[in-house]
Amino acid sequence: MATGIRVFYYPCSMNWEAFWDARAQAADPNTQVGRLSKVAPEQLNDRIAQHIGQQLDLQPTDRLLDVCCGNGVLTALLAKHCQQVVGADVSEKLIAQAKKHHAATNLHFVKANALQLSGLGGQFSKINLYFSFQYFEDYDTGLRVLAEMESLLAPGGRIFIGDTPDARRWFAYYNHPVKWLRYVYQKWKGTEPMGKFWHPHAFQKMAEELGLSVEILPEPSDLPYAWYRFDALFTKKLA
């Protein structure tokens, strides 16, 4: 009995690098990054890129870091509004897709773990991490990721963490006993694909620890996951 309880509370962890390497083999670019919607893919990606650009207030002089960039579809759209963009992702196969399909003189892709971004070098005026913070599944890991981004952010710069599952809406997403059971089973096996539902209070606490200001924002209602996700905009104080 004790062993069963221990297994329940300490399930296997998902190997996210292997998960996204496998997804990268899909033919459809949006399937590769798990961005599925009834909206036409080009229209959806244009709208998401517009939303990110507005929140970060992207300018032609900006140097942007796109963390967890996946196959670079959104990164390439954001690069149209910046002087230089670096896309980083832990999946080697998604980075290969990005390099293959999104070549541009102001755009560079690199395989990098979000927990080890310091090797990218230099400072960025803006940093984006969209649709991916859920894959950092505990507070300490999330704090480390935010700290890595903060260390590369210029004074006065912005970090946008968008499209994060909201812990306050867990039961809105898992809204049926069958879904609860599937969630528990997948967590136990280490195959649960959603990741962590974060509470905005955790983002506020991380911001306080790192000396950042933060705004917790609702997603625009025309984005497909707005009903159970939220955005957060962090700002670094001027020196």
Image (cartoon, rainbow, N blue to C red):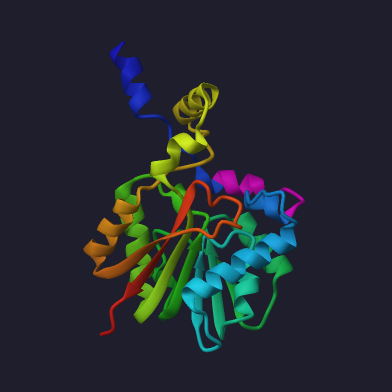
Q: Is residue 183 visible?
A: yes
Outermost residue, front side: 221
Residue 136 in the image, given as x and y percentages of width and height: 41, 49
Q: Is residue 102 left or right of residue 188?
A: right
59 in relation to 179, above or below: below
Q: Is residue 127 left or right of residue 44?
A: left
80 in relation to 31, above or below: below
Q: Is residue 24 visible?
A: no
Q: Is residue 93 left or right of residue 4?
A: right
Residue 152 in the image, given as x and y percentages of width and height: 38, 74
Residue drawn at x 50%, y 33% as measured from the top left: 174
Of residues 124 and 235, which is closer to you in this image? 235
Quarter in which the N terminus is drawn: top left
Of residues 219 and 164, which is closer to you in this image? 219
Residue 105 in the image, given as x and y percentages of width and height: 66, 83
Residue drawn at x 56%, y 86% as measured from the top left: 83
Outermost residue, bottom side: 61
Outermost residue, top side: 1
Read off the magenta span.
Answer: 18-28
Q: Is residue 39 left or right of residue 84?
A: right
Residue 100 image-quadrant placement: bottom right
Quarter in which the C terminus is drawn: bottom left
